[in-house]
Amino acid sequence: MNQVAIQIPIRHVCRLLMESRRIQCDRTHLSQSAIVFAPHPDDETLGCGGTILQKKQAGAALKIVFMTDGSQSHSHLIPAEKLKAIRAKEALAAVEKLGVEPRNVLFLGIKDGTLTYNQAIAIEKVKQIILRTLPEAIFIPYVRDGVPDHDATNQIAIAALRQCGIPVTVYEYPIWFWRRWPWTVFEGDKNPPLSVWREHLAGSFQLLQKFSYAVDIHAVLDHKRIALEQHQSQMTRLKPDPRWLTLGDVSQGDFLNCFFQNYEFFRRYRLN
């Protein structure tokens, strides 16, 4: 099967299906107070940057919590401590473009890639934030996003909420879960075996089935792009080395395009 020949029309159909069955967010929900939990700097903008912009415009009180320091993304090319400082600076620049004040940004400082092994510490920190803030909603990565720090962020936030016993609305946003055909090209093998097709199509079906709650972000797409550009270490090569991969390099640009559709999609449910 030639994936290139059928990818674009099938992706178009999938996009139409997602949009046709969407439950669209209203202003009441946009104005609710919230905490956005981001595994790494840039996930906040990728997954819900447009929603953050819309919520701030609706007057919502909003905090952003960065779970890890992002120090390992290019640590093979730059010292981890230097990269940690760069990514913290980029995070503050990005959230400023999203309308979030520095006083409402928190860094847990857990080493990138180790969140799974530091869940007990992270749960206690997240509980303190939740109890101080008492949000009406939280935004976290999808429970099966597929990257350890992302999955751990979900587990930590849910565990903390259960221990706090505070009723909230949960919005799970996909990041790496988008990396499935037809949303992105197959990398490597241009004609993969049937088992790979099945895996990717099953994931795409989950996107269609589970992510029915949508926030219309078409009016703020340019602002979202500007915010993402602040994460320069992820969007450009800080060193002229081809090993410095950027988000635009993933799946020949298809991956990045997933975050600039007219809607941001969420799996939404009530907890407690």
Image (tube, grey):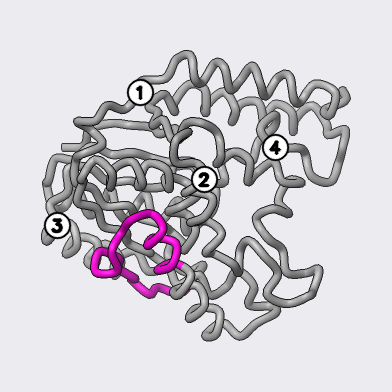
The amino acid beneath tag 4 is Thr
Are dots 3 and 4 in contact, CB under 8 Å?
Answer: no
- Mark 2 vs mark 3: in front: 2
Q: Position of residue 240 (x, y in %)?
A: 78, 75
Q: Which residues are magenta?
A: 91-111
Can residue 117 be spotted in the picture? no
Residue 24 disc label: 1
- Mark 1 vs mark 2: in front: 2
Circle nearer the N terminus (1, 2): 1
Give the secondary structure at mark 3: helix
Residue drawn at 26 percent across, 36 percent down: 30
Q: Is residue 118 above or below residue 3?
A: below
Circle nearer the N terminus (2, 3): 3
The amino acid beneath tag 2 is Asp
Give the secondary structure at mark 4: loop
| Residue that numbered label 3 is attached to | 133
| Residue that numbered label 2 is attached to | 222
| Residue that numbered label 4 is attached to | 184
Magenta stretch holds residue 98: yes
Cα distance, mark 2 to mark 3?
A: 30 Å
Asked if residue 129 lies left or right of residue 111, the reply is left
Asked if residue 152 lies left or right of residue 12, the reply is left
Give the secondary structure at mark 1: strand
Residue drawn at 82 percent across, 28 percent down: 3
Are dots 4 and 2 in contact, CB under 8 Å?
Answer: no
Can residue 27 be spotted in the picture? yes
Circle nearer the N terminus (3, 1): 1
